[in-house]
Image (cartoon, grey):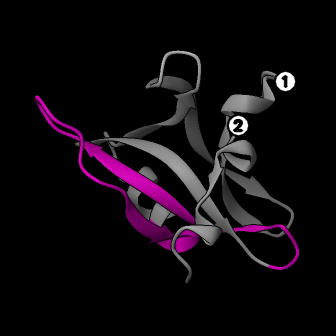
């Protein structure tokens, strides 16, 4: 049973998310980002007891804030991760930090 936070994504040339920046929540700390492929991220979150939320940088307070729950859903092209579809773009997966320009594939 593990708790994760997702702070960013990597996208392909079609703007489709291919990888996620996962942080493991420990008792008193949170790990540095670990790059997970879409398949690995799905596998992690399909494991019973595991959960994840988006982790959004708040520029006003210069601190991270917890966003929305992330779940695995079945789409027409297969499984993918989706955050709570509440129409708040800033905490949705596609609008997290684009790590592609920080750390390439």
Rendered view: 77 above or below 28: below
Viewer-side residue, 44 vs 53? 53
Residue hosting label 2? 92
Give the SS element for disc 2.
loop
Rendered view: 102 above or below 93: below
Q: Answer whether residue 96 is visible to the viewer in this image.
A: yes
In which quadrant will I find the C terminus?
bottom right
Give the SS element for disc 1.
loop
26 with respect to 33 (left or right)? left
Q: Answer whether residue 84 is visible to the viewer in this image.
A: no
Viewer-side residue, 50 vs 3? 3
Task: State the image coordinates of residue 96 (x, y, percent, origin top left).
Answer: 65, 45
Residue 103 belongs to the span the image colors magenta: no
Q: Quadrant of residue 19?
A: bottom right
Q: Quadrant of residue 28?
A: top left
Q: Check whether the beta carbons of the residues at disc 1 and disc 2 lie within 8 A of each other.
A: no
Residue 36 belongs to the span the image colors magenta: yes
Specify the segment rendered in magenta: 13-40
| Distance (Cα) linking label 1 and label 2 | 8 Å
- The residue at 34%/43% (across/down) is 50
Residue hosting label 1? 87
- The residue at 58%/62% (across/down) is 99
- The residue at 39%/58% (across/down) is 44
70 with respect to 93 (left or right)? left
């Amino acid at each position: 049973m593990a708790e994760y936070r997702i702070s960013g994504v990597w996208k392909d040339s079609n703007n489709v998310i291919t990888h996620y920046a996962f942080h493991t929540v420990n008792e008193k700390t949170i790990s540095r980002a670990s790059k997970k492929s879409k398949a690995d991220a799905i596998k992690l979150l399909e494991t019973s007891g595991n959960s994840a939320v988006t982790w959004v940088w708040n520029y006003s307070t210069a601190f991270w804030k917890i966003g929305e729950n992330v779940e695995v859903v079945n789409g027409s092209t297969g499984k993918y991760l989706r955050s709570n579809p509440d129409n708040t773009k800033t905490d949705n997966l596609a609008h997290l930090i684009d790590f592609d320009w920080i750390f390439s594939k």
